[in-house]
Image (cartoon, coloured by chain):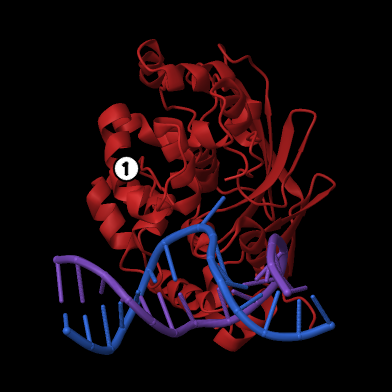
Chain colours: A red, B blue, C purple
DNA sequence: GCGTCCAGGTCTACC
DNA sequence: GGTAGACCTGGACGC
């Protein structure tokens, strides 16, 4: 077995700040979602209500993060410690709190979403189960693109295998606060790797070519997620679909605009929830389900999507459906 | 143990 | 512009 190409970064300097959130905000449900999805990297740790994770800013510098709630769901406040290689610059002291707040969706007001519960039994169930949970964002675009590409045409265990191998072989290990956290590869690292090497080391198959091309495009200059959010939703999606291997589904996953990223698996779940039966042809029903979601939940359909996929056990029991084995 | 099938999409060639 | 077929890999399944 070839040795790992992972780099190691020690982060001895620390800075702390507090951030207020728009209530209701449940920190634990937001950063440690019931379905098990991580906030920023599959190798972060969540213990006793605190999260240790990593973050790469758009200029490429890595930081360690320790986050915990110091308020309540109705008076939410987050205590954040940032660990860095050197003392933070004045610019970083301004940028990092803004980026953490953006990532955690602290300023987003979801009370309008919760008013849908008054007339929608499904939303009422979701809100009751996951009150205060937020959708979150990623500070850097490349991990989101890796996620989208490795989810394509593969069962989730195989996607996990590809992502974990990418991180373990080409990612970065950050050491801070007595912890070691593995974080996603920088696009420059994947752009330098050979296609054959990526296929062999990370079992990416035909996706290796796409991922390398995506990495090369980002290195040459591509809008950040923050820039894409400033664009109209259609324009941002079209820009993402210019990338090799990024189609409509993947663009919906990566785009910071609220979308409804249905794949075959989630189409089966929503077909069951909306019509009470298994879809005969899940792939072909996706456009219809997307239209229904847009008409029924409007700009909050992305929230319904995230809440549903994090509440499958409760929904299965409550509506007498088998959603967990689709 | 071995062969076959197919999955949480995308691209391309062909009509 | 619409659509069938190819694409890596590995787990599930049948024999």
Residue A148 vs residue A215, the one in the foreground: A148
Expressed as whole percent of the image width and height from the top left, the position of residue A317 reads: 62, 24
**Other residues around mark 1 within 10 Å, as few (<14) / some (14–19) / many (≥20):** some
* Residue at screen point 38% across, 51% down: A252
* Residue at screen point 57% across, 67% down: A186
Work out which quarter of the rendered image holds the C terminus of chain A and state it.
Answer: top right
Residue at disc 1, secondary structure: helix
Q: Is residue A1 above or below residue A82?
A: below
Expressed as whole percent of the image width and height from the top left, the position of residue A83 reads: 70, 46
Would you identify the image quadrant in which residue A110 lies? top left
Work out which quarter of the rendered image holds the N terminus of chain A and state it.
Answer: bottom right
Q: Chain of mark 1?
A: A
Residue A51 vs residue A262, the one in the foreground: A262
Would you identify the image quadrant in which residue A150 lies? bottom right
Expressed as whole percent of the image width and height from the top left, the position of residue A291 reads: 27, 40
Residue A68 visible to an observer of this rendering: yes
Residue C4 falls left or right of residue A308: left
Residue behind mark 1: A290
* Residue at screen point 76% across, 76% down: A4
Residue A26 falls left or right of residue A181: left
Residue C9 falls left or right of residue A106: right
Expressed as whole percent of the image width and height from the top left, the position of residue A137 reads: 49, 43
Residue A1 visible to an observer of this rendering: no
Residue A289 vs residue A212, the one in the foreground: A289
Would you identify the image quadrant in which residue A131 lies? top right
């Amino acid at each position: 077995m070839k040795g790992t190409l992972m780099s190691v970064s020690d982060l001895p300097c620390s800075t702390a700040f507090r951030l207020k959130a728009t209530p209701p905000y449940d920190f634990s449900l937001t950063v440690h979602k019931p379905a098990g999805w991580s906030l920023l990297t599959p190798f972060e740790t969540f213990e006793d209500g605190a999260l240790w994770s990593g973050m790469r800013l758009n200029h490429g510098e890595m930081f360690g993060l320790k986050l915990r709630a110091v308020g309540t769901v109705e008076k939410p406040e987050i205590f954040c410690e940032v660990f860095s290689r050197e003392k933070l610059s004045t610019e970083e002291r301004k940028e990092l709190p803004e980026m953490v707040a953006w990532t955690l969706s602290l300023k987003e007001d979801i009370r309008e979403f919760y008013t849908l519960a008054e007339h929608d039994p499904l939303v009422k169930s979701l809100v009751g189960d996951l009150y205060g949970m937020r959708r979150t964002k990623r500070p850097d675009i490349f991990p989101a693109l890796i996620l989208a590409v490795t989810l394509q045409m593969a069962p989730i265990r195989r996607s996990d295998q590809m992502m974990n191998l990418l991180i373990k072989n080409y990612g970065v290990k950050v050491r801070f606060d007595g912890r070691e956290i593995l974080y996603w590869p920088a696009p420059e690292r994947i752009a330098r790797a050979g296609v054959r090497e990526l296929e062999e080391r990370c079992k990416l198959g035909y996706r290796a070519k796409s991922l390398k091309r995506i990495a090369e495009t980002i290195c040459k200059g591509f809008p950040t997620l923050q820039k894409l959010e400033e664009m109209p939703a259609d324009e941002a999606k079209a820009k993402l679909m210019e990338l090799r291997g990024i189609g409509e589904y993947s663009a919906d996953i990566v785009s910071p605009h609220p979308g409804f990223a249905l794949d075959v698996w989630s189409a089966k779940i929503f077909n069951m929830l909306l019509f009470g039966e298994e879809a005969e042809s899940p792939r072909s029903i996706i456009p219809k389900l997307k239209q229904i979601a847009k008409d029924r939940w409007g700009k909050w359909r992305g929230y319904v999507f995230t809440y549903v996929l994090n509440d499958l056990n409760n929904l299965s029991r409550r509506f007498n459906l088998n959603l967990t084995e689709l």
